[in-house]
Amino acid sequence: MTGFLRPADTPAGRRAWLAGLCESIPRAGSKNDLLDLIDSALSVSAPKGDVGTLETLSKRYRDQVDKAGDVYDRVDRVSRKGLPEVWVGDTSVLASDVVAAAARAATQLAEAFQGGALVLLTLADAVKDAQKQDHDGRGKLQDAKTKLGGRDGFFDDLHENDDEENDRLTARFFASDGVGLMHAAAVSEEEAVRIAARDLNKWTSEARAGKLDTSELTAVDRLMLADTSAVDGDPEMNEILSAGDLERAARRMDGLNLDDEAAMERMLSHSDSAQERAYLMKALASGHSVQEIEAFQGKIHGKDPEWMRRHLTPVVTEADSLDDEGLAKDGSNNNKDYVTFDGQAWIQGGNGSEGTCVASSTVTARAIVDPLYALDLTGGPSGQEDDPKAFRDRLVAEQHRLHTEGDGGKNWGGMGQDGQERIADSAIGSATGNDYQRHDLNNADERRAVLTDVEKAVAEGRPVPVDVSGSNGAHAMTIIAQEGDMLQVYNPWGTTTWVSEDDFINGNMGKASSSDLPNAYQVYVPQ
């Protein structure tokens, strides 16, 4: 063996390269081969990262926690003085509600800074440990090189006496130990970087108050819109406007002409509740014209928050939905929430009998991000219906429409990859402003590598279709949220549940469907 390629200079590339050397070094049959392999290992970059810089940034974040706490204390003092029932902001909200929202925003901000500080400090510790482990491994490899001495010439390599063989085997032992330490360091580095990126993305998405960055609304109005949640669930897990919605709504608001801007502000100010205002802004974020939103408001104006939740928010996440309640006989989680409208499930074929899982997942994903689309399905042309049978008929018809658009199979069964990507773009992407791209997942490493992009997307409110396979064929579902190392999955059999990152990576996705469908083999990620 002479010469070697350089590994990709990424955490995953370094880890994969060193994994190969962990297998080849213990099998090196000659002195020169072993020297080549040692040089190959030493060519791999050490774990990157400036521990001091990370610790300094962590301290800066912690310092901001105290400042956010000061803001909360000042807001709390105001709230305890007793506020008059006065209206403030362009959209006419109660001052008392604004103060309560400001207190929650200050708390969220403090939690985001505290969380970010902890993420950076944890990353600093992981980088420090990985660099130490990598350094120790390199030392053992250098010792092995010293033991071996210079390269053998052609004739020297033809014969190996007992002393030379002993030196080679001893050096090979040290080299194997050394490359094992370097590989362990690379594994730790890759996982630490992935977790830090995941958590920082999540904390960024949860620091919501500044994301509705438009000069067309007052600070009070922006604060209230970011604070409003759908009823019937945990408020912090059911905000009507996702982080992505807030950013898109701000861009759309800033791009309106004067007439449309005035109409939008008029609709917001005439709304009867915080939820009505939030759904109007979500409609703007999902790409609808001001004229379409005016018609939409005519259908929802004056409705109570429970009616709006039922008609406009298909999935509500309960506070106890993350509890581990074990597995059912089919291998799925016992702790599942049912996604229903007036008792009728959001389920493929209306009763689970058809093979339209791709189209059905896409329909529900679109309804999650687009309240006008959701109301068309639940409320019918008038938007006023509360008829589960009529909803089922419209739901199945829309599933069939998308199944046909995606060139799905006859008898409402199966859909190819091109069709799935096409309807993800046309249905979900048209509302979020994203193009969806398929990622094939052939092994645990590829699933691990795509997780950061998946989790960033869902933290911002952009659903990610995921396909699973096993002894029972294949099935399509959608990842819709993330909390810590858990992923919330909507299954078009009419349920949501949570699986862990480890479940996604290592073939335990049956917890979201059944044990016959364990392997995530592709995802469609918004770009």
Image (cartoon, rainbow, N blue to C red):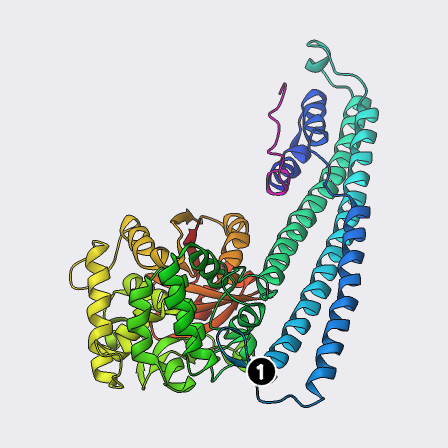
Tally the marks. Answer: 1
The secondary structure that most of the magenta stretch takes on is: loop
Residue 178 placement: quadrant: top right
Q: Nearer the viewer, residue 364 or 310?
A: 310
Residue farthest toward the left in the current orientation of the protein: 410
Secondary-structure class at tag 1 = helix
Give the residue at x 52% y 80%.
Answer: 93
**Taking 461 as reference, is 444 above or below it?**
above
Q: Nearer the viewer, residue 393 or 441?
A: 393
The picture places residue 434, in percent across and down from the top left corner, at 40, 52
Give the residue at x 71% y 42%.
Answer: 180
Can residue 468 be seen in the rendering of this structure?
Answer: no
The picture places residue 238, in percent across and down from the top left corner, at 50, 75
The residue wearing badge 1 is 97
Residue 141 placement: quadrant: top right
The picture places residue 339, in percent across and down from the top left corner, at 38, 78
Label 1: few (<14), some (14–19) or many (≥20) C-alpha neighbours in 10 Å: some
Which range of residues does the magenta coloring cover? 1-14
Residue 70 placement: quadrant: bottom right
Q: Is 161 placed left or right of 24 in the picture? A: right
Q: Quadrant of the N terminus?
A: top right
Can residue 344 be seen in the rendering of this structure?
Answer: yes
The amino acid type, in three-letter code, at marker 1 is: Asp
Give the residue at x 57% y 71%.
Answer: 223
**Taking 455 as reference, is 26 above or below it?**
above
Q: Is 26 placed left or right of 477 in the picture? A: right
Give the residue at x 53% y 60%.
Answer: 215
The picture places residue 80, in percent across and down from the top left corner, at 71, 88
Residue 467 on the magenta segment: no
Q: Nearer the viewer, residue 419 or 225?
A: 225
